[in-house]
Image (cartoon, grey):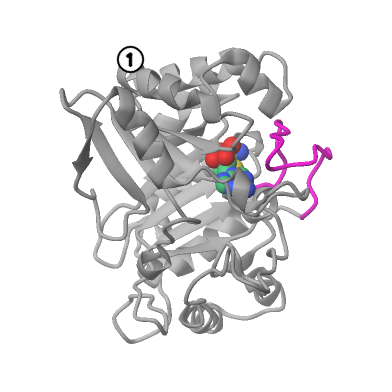
């Protein structure tokens, strides 16, 4: 057995299962592999070029991810910034596909992308071992879409990317749309048709205060209740059971069973009690919540010479201290120390 297929060693003797002090099991790791992006979505980035935080080498990401896997992480999602801009993303996935959980299982490997480079990469990503992809797409109307991304021609590229990913079997293919009142809330009905026609799962996401600029206000959030009512006026929605415990999206289909809609409502109906995630930023810091005020410098410890036993113990301690919940909308709420594009969405 090669080193890559050997279940990674945590150096700990107890059964590997990351938990926090609020009784949640953590099995989902999101890894940002760059904070660069080729889009300038109005609700996310200012549009400054280049990375603001350093990127690690592939071997360094792998080293850290292996430690998490040995501790019970079974799902790894690559994100960014835009992960498909990262050199060596296919090779990184190939390596991740060789990892096994302590129970000997393959990882569930997913990727979140804006889809711009997906058409040319979908086949290689699938061959490398990627299971699923989520594409961000905030409008089904090209002009509205490009007003949001601020990149001419982006709509056609994303559409081609979605179709290529679906053709490669990177399914269920999820399309995430962040709804902003006054910008794209007129797209809801169009997305319902899109989900049914393109055979993708469209998920509406409530806008969170995670942008680089100050745009967010409670009034800009289109809440779950309103989305359900809007869709229900033309097409009655039928509830679907969660696919897995701790699923963040409420799932719906239609009376004829064609098409699936999800709604992720972190603002109006927070799901922190079921959160099973932690994040690793592109510069190797652990974030235990999107809204954390502190980061935990795992990579700094690796560079400082900590061995795997020490790093694993640090991960266990850090995850144990995961915040109970976020405080969006409450008096005294503070935006996190980084915005979404620099955390890894
Ligand atoms: N570039 C990739 C993409 O576009 O999917 C991955 C990174 S992007 C930051 C990840 C997700 O975060 C996207 O679906 C994006 O729409 C979402 N996002 C960014 N800012 C957000 C905000 N303030 N509220 C809710 N979602 C946000």
| Residue 135 horizontal side relative to residue 173, left or right | right
Relative height, residue 111 to residue 25 (above, below): above
User: Quick one: SS at disc 1?
Assistant: helix
- In the image, residue 191 lies at what x, y percent? 43, 24
Residue ID for mark 1: 197
Q: Residue at horizontal 77%, vertical 55%?
A: 53
Range of magenta residues: 34-53
Quarter assignment of residue 333: bottom right
**Quick check: is 128 in the magenta stretch?**
no
Callout 1: few (<14), some (14-19), or many (20+) C-alpha neighbours within 10 Å? Answer: few
- In the image, residue 85 lies at what x, y percent? 66, 34
Q: Residue at horizontal 72%, vertical 36%?
A: 42
**Image quarter hosting the N terminus:** bottom left
Q: Residue at horizontal 36%, vertical 18%?
A: 193
Camera-nearest residue between 288 and 1: 288
Camera-nearest residue between 23 and 7: 23
């Amino acid at each position: 057995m090669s080193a890559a297929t050997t279940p990674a060693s945590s150096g700990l003797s107890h059964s590997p299962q990351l938990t926090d002090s609020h009784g949640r099991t953590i099995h989902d790791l999101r890894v940002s592999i760059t904070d660069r992006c080729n889009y300038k979505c109005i609700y996310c980035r200012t549009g400054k070029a280049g990375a603001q935080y350093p990127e690690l080498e592939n071997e360094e990401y792998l080293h850290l991810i292996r430690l998490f896997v040995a501790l019970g992480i079974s799902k790894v999602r690559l994100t960014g910034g835009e992960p498909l801009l990262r050199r060596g993303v296919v090779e990184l996935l190939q390596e991740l596909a060789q990892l096994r959980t302590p129970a000997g299982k393959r990882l569930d490997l997913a990727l979140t992308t804006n889809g711009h480079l997906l058409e040319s990469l979908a086949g290689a990503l699938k061959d490398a071992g990627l299971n699923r992809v989520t594409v961000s797409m905030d409008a089904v109307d090209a002009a509205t879409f490009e007003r949001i991304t601020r990149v001419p021609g982006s709509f056609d590229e994303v559409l081609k990317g979605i179709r290529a990913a679906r053709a490669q079997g990177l399914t269920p293919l999820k399309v995430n749309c962040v709804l902003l009142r006054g910008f794209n809330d007129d797209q809801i009905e169009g997305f319902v048709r899109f989900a049914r026609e393109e055979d993708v799962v469209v998920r509406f996401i409530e806008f969170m205060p995670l942008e680089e600029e100050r745009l967010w206000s409670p009034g800009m959030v289109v809440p779950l209740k309103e989305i359900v009512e809007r869709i229900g006026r033309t097409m009655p929605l039928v509830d679907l059971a969660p696919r897995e415990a701790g699923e963040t999206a409420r799932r719906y289909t239609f009376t004829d069973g064609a098409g699936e809609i999800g709604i992720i409502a972190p603002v109006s109906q927070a799901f922190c009690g079921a959160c099973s995630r932690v994040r690793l930023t592109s510069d190797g810091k652990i974030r235990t919540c999107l809204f954390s005020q502190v980061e935990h410098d795992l990579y700094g410890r690796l560079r400082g010479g900590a061995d795997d036993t020490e790093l694993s113990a640090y991960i266990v301690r850090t995850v144990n201290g995961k915040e109970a919940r976020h405080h969006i909308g409450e008096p005294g709420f503070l935006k996190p120390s980084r915005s979404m594009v620099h955390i890894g969405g």
